[in-house]
Image: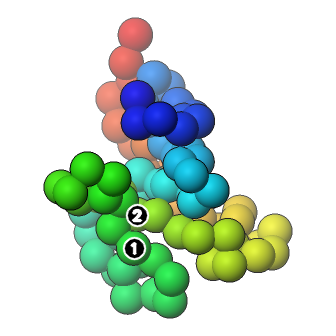
Amino acid sequence: MFGGTGFLLRGNMCCGVHKGRLILRVGIDAAETALREPHVRPFDITGKPMRGWVMLPAVAIAGDVELKRWIALAANFAGELPPKE
């Protein structure tokens, strides 16, 4: 979809990796909050940021606890979306 590896939850894009960065679909409100954290950037690979998505470099997810926290945020959002067939 975007030149990286993506993971779906109930048919909805949840998270993935693009050029060594973790990308997460967290929703618009959570993205606005997440962007206040160090290293977090909007997911923008085309010049037009994707609303509700964020991108993190490896330094932002150095430990298992941080990685799990970010993946849980994305999984919670994607899990609330209607399933796709």
Residue 70: numbered disc: none
Q: Position of residue 79 (x, y in %)?
A: 47, 40
Asked if 78 appears above or below 48 in the picture, the reply is above
Specify the quadrant that holds the C terminus: top left
Q: Are marks 2 and 1 in contact (CB under 8 Å)?
A: yes
The answer to whether any part of residue 54 appears in the image is yes
Instruction: Name the residue beneath numbered marker 2.
Output: 54
Mark 2 residue element: strand
Residue found at x 46% / y 64%: 55
Please tell me how crowded label 1 is: few (under 14), some (14-19), or many (20+) other residues with Cα within 10 Å: some
Asked if 44 appears above or below 33 in the picture, the reply is above
Q: Earlier in the sequence, mark 2 or mark 1?
A: 1
Please tell me how crowded label 2 is: few (under 14), some (14-19), or many (20+) other residues with Cα within 10 Å: many
Specify the quadrant that holds the N terminus: top left
Q: Position of residue 19 (x, y in %)?
A: 56, 52
Asked if 20 appears above or below 75 in the picture, the reply is below
Instruction: Name the residue beneath numbered marker 1.
Output: 41
The answer to whether any part of residue 9 appears in the image is no
Q: Position of residue 21 (x, y in %)?
A: 57, 59
Q: Amino acid at mark 2?
A: Val
In three-dimensional space, the C-alpha distance between marks 2 and 1, rounded to whole angstroms, equals 6 Å
Residue found at x 37% / y 18%: 84
Mark 1 residue element: strand
- Which is nearer the eye, 82 or 47? 47
